[in-house]
Amino acid sequence: MNHRSTQQLVHDLKNNDRLIEYAEPVDAHLEIAEIQRRVYANQGPAVLFSNVRGSRFPLVGNVFGTIEQARFIFRKNIESVRRAIELKIDPNRFFQKPFRYWKAPWTALAMRPKRRKWGAVLKNVIRVADLPQLQSWPDDGGAFVTLPQVYSENPSRGKGSGSPLTDSNLGMYRVQISGNRYAGDEVGLHYQIHRGIGVHHQAALEQGKPLKVNVFVGGTPAMTLSAVMPLPEGLSELTFAGALAGHRIPMVQVGDAASIYGDADFCLQGTLLEREKPEGPFGDHLGYYSLVHDFPVLKVEKVYHRDGAIWPFTVVGRPPQEDTTFGDLIHELTGPIIPTVIPGVSGVNAVDASGVHPLLLAMGSERYVPYQQDQPRPQELLTQANAILGQGQMSLAKYLLIANQSDDPGLSVNRIEPFFEHVLRRADWERDLHFQTKTTMDTLDYSGSGFNEGSKLVVAARGPARHELATTLPAGFALPNGYDEPTIPLPGVLAVKGPAFSPGNRDVHSFCNGCTGDHPVNRFRLIVIVDDSDFAARGINNFLWVVFTRSNPAVDIDGVESFFDNKHWGCRGALVIDSRIKPHHAPPLVEDPDVTAKVDSIAASGHPLSRYL
């Protein structure tokens, strides 16, 4: 069905045994979030919390708990959107298979948003304090909106003609609605680098105009997905949402404010102030708290809600979490577009277990000099890597590993362990490490040298396998003093427990100096220095999370027998990454033990929800 409200979505899921209602009293402070995390981890259904202490509205979570459920939600229109994307990639397909694509023009018509004079969301007016006060992690700075659809329009475009709707931005930037810094009609708007709203904000500042911003919650789930969709500039998220929802998105003009999504469950209508306030902390999707920083303040002029409004929410934390499903669905829909955007690149994978932006795997193709197969060094792969790092959200990648497709036609960026082995067998540490220093990083990544500051590393691998990957420790294996408990997370990779990190201590460099020549440590291609080597080797997800969220390439990478050659850095022995916790890192997320005990009691209660706890 074409859902036009969260209530319709809830009824659809419930009628198809995809939702459990929990009517017992429950607290929005930490308890609901821990329940949702457990239900997600056990592949459970959506959960409707209909008796939330202190809230006049029910809350629904885990709506996108599995990729299969996401496909179910969009079952009516996802195939037509997929076919429209296929035609976008290759218009000649229409003539090759006209019966497959005959509906595509109608999909295009459905994409256009439409003006309306009224919308269901405008029925009721409340205060910010009346909204559900959801807090997910113990040290969060207050309550946050976790599935916001933040909408703005380009202030350079005129009103009345409908053109602002197609020059708009819909993004998911968290909104802090309470805490010791926000109260009354002011809320915090956390938008990070490389976000579309920043273009509108800059244009407003240049014109001396205030930027009108609305925050929608609920409505069709297509609007939620569109808010996180990495669409190219010039394509409005409203158009994509219309295609996926199966109906044109109704937008209402109220005074001189930005247009309001008429079918939303809630809308916070406001204006960005010319000042910032501290926002956070917030337990975020890398598995750590994002710390307190100054962000724009949204002065809320009106808060609307429709009759029967339900508050959808999600909880983020160390991946995988519910937002993993968003990434999987986005990849399904947009993955085929990648070769048309970046020639020669056949696939990319922003690795969810590493926190998405810290690690990106890519498959490219070498076509520059096919007549020089006897000298298989990366060439076009480096051009493609630079193109990837200049493309949308992929520009935030910290580690980019790119391989040549023709070296192993069966290799996939989505099979992480074989991909790592492929790269480790082929990459030459003397030649194939390419750093970018003092550059921008993901706002949520605290491994760098400052806020939004850090470095990147491109590892390009081309040619036949040239290295054996050790899978066992050789007899008599010994490590330099202070390092012990070696484990093998992957073939060719050694995790070593190091001493606690001390600022200004060059102990990793000393480690490398103690492993020169034919030292057996060099039978491993990659050495990772960690605080807990057993944890790092206990599953691929642990390895990815520890190594790539806790290291800054230009600072934390060293190597055995390292050297500089015309400002190019390399090493002749093992590559070493220092992935220990440093003092400037953000703290990891840990549940509150009292809340854990409360949820444990629910798990023992015999309620239908307990099977997923």
Image (spheres, rainbow, N blue to C red):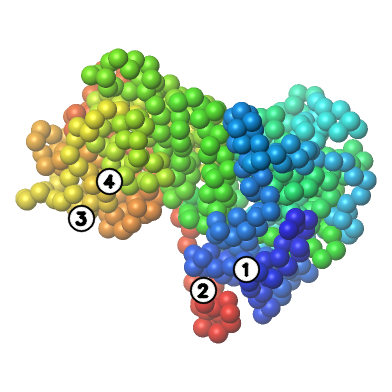
Q: Are marks 3 and 4 in contact (CB under 8 Å)?
A: no
Whether residue 190 is situated above or below residue 594 in the rendered picture? above
Of callouts 3 and 4, which one flags the residue occurring earlier in the amino acid sequence?
3
What crowding class fits label 2: few (fewer than 14 Cα within 10 Å), some (14-19), or many (20 or more)? many
Q: Amino acid at mark 2?
A: Leu
For marks 3 and 4, give the CA distance.
11 Å
Secondary structure of the residue carrying numbered label 1: loop
Residue under the image location 41 percent in, 29 percent down: 364
**Precedes in sequence: disc 2 or disc 1:** 1
Residue at the disc numbered 1: 18
Apparent side of residue 343 relative to residue 434 in the rendered image (left or right): right
Secondary structure under tag 4 reads: strand
Q: Amino acid at mark 4?
A: Ile
* Residue 434 point in image, percent of width and height: 36, 26
Element type at mark 2: loop
The answer to which of marks 4 and 2 sits earlier in the sequence is 4
Count neighbours of disc 1 (C-alpha within 10 A) and say few if under 14, some if 14 to 19, many if 20 or more. some
Residue topped by disc 2: 613
Residue under the point 9% across and 36% down:
518
* Residue 153 in view here: no
State which quadrant residue 409 falls in: top left
Could you tell me residue 558's position as x and y percent? 27, 34
- Quarter occupied by residue 180: bottom right
Q: CA distance from mark 1 to mark 4?
A: 44 Å
Q: Which residue is mark 4?
A: 529
Residues 468 and 139: in front is 468
Q: Are marks 2 and 1 in contact (CB under 8 Å)?
A: no
Residue at horizontal 66 percent and vertical 40 percent from the top: 99
Q: Label 2, label 3: how many angstroms apart (C-alpha)?
A: 34 Å
Report the disc number at residue 412. none
- Quickly name the residue at label 3: 485
